[in-house]
Amino acid sequence: SVYPALANEGIAQRETLSSMAKRYNAIVGINAGYFTSRGDPLGTLIIGRKLVSSPLYGRSVFGITENDAVVFGNPEFSGTLKASSFSVPITAINQPRRGSSITVYTSEYADSTQTEEIGKEIILIKGKIVGIQERNASIPPDGVVVSAGGNYTKLFEQLRLGETIDINYSVAPPWNTIRQAVCGGPRLIENGNISINHAEEKFNPALVSARHPRTAIGLSFDGDLIMIVVDGRSKHSAGMTLKELALYLQKMRIRHAINLDGGGSSTMVVKGRIVNAPSDGSERKISNGLLILKP
């Protein structure tokens, strides 16, 4: 089975891939999605059908269906918060709060929202407001925190303790029924053709054109799942541009493939042993990994 593992079983955390693999007794593991320096995953993360982190910039995602089929795509997110006096769109789930936005933090995230900028945060248990703070509110194990920043802060000042709040959010089909998913980007191969969409997914062009260590995941025309790690930034290996990586995958008869986090994060573990040469000289602590577990 394919399983996305979180660092230390939390979101705003970091841990080495080999440590994650050991905890799950994984056969194989690779680093997965991008993350902030603190360890917040950037983009879609679904574990056990639960949306742990919402889509970002419509970036490419790898997923596993309930029937163990492999899917690739660009999930869309939507959500709404309804109070007695207003209704507003939800911006993100378990992502760093940015500017004028409304972010929902669940118990998977951390002990608190870890927000630094002043805003307005409401603590909800069973849909009722049980606490109101300006930042870094504690997240209850049986509830959520909704954090408002920027222009939404003043709107949240209308809310009072005991008020009922209705929250609904989801990713669009078929991603709302996907069992596991991790975000990467940009796309590399689509239906056997090279299709690098870095501009659409808001990636820096330097990520595409320069040679770096790389990690990618793909599906062959024969139905095989392919995990690949490319070493780089050393005298032994320069790494690959994304075009070179896509060409290599195309020669391997890969039908669909996306790029994952690379650079110093690029790591592969097989049966407890690191089989590549991480460019930092040792394993980098990462936010999330993608593991192959024994059935």
Image (cartoon, rainbow, N blue to C red):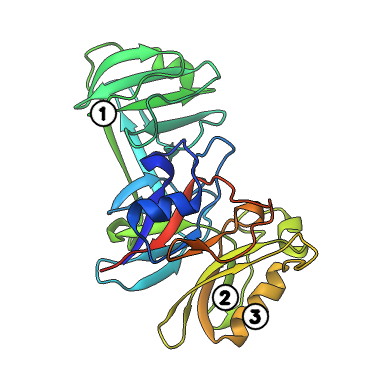
Viewer-closest of 193 and 231: 231
- What residue sits 60% from the left and 65% below the top? 276
Amino acid, disc 1: Pro
Question: In whole angstroms, how far apart are the C-alphas of marks 2 and 3?
Answer: 10 Å
| Residue 149, x across and y down, in percent | 50, 23
Residue 116 vertical position relative to residue 175 in the rendered view, above or below: above
Amino acid, disc 2: Ile
Where does label 3 land, which residue? 248
Where does label 2 land, which residue? 189
The local crowd at label 3, few if under 14, some if 14 to 19, many if 20 or more residues have their Cα within 10 Å, is few
Whether residue 267 sits left or right of residue 141 in the image: it is: right
Residue 277 vertical position relative to residue 204 in the rendered view, above or below: below
| Residue 256, x across and y down, in percent | 50, 76
Which of the two labelled residues, at mark 1 and mark 2, occupies the earlier sequence position?
Answer: 1
Viewer-closest of 42 and 88: 42
- What residue sits 77% from the left and 61% below the top? 234
Helix, strand or loop status at disc 2 = strand
Whether residue 169 sits left or right of residue 29 in the image: it is: left
Viewer-closest of 28 and 175: 28
Residue 101 vertical position relative to residue 199 in the rendered view, above or below: above
In terms of image quadrants, where is residue 277?
bottom right
Quadrant location of the C terminus? Answer: bottom left
Where does label 1 land, which residue? 141
Viewer-closest of 202 and 249: 249
Question: In whole angstroms, how far apart are the C-alphas of marks 1 and 2?
Answer: 41 Å
Residue 258 vertical position relative to residue 154 in the rendered view, above or below: below
The local crowd at label 2, few if under 14, some if 14 to 19, many if 20 or more residues have their Cα within 10 Å, is many
Question: In whole angstroms, how far apart are the C-alphas of marks 1 and 3?
Answer: 46 Å
| Residue 221, x across and y down, in percent | 46, 87
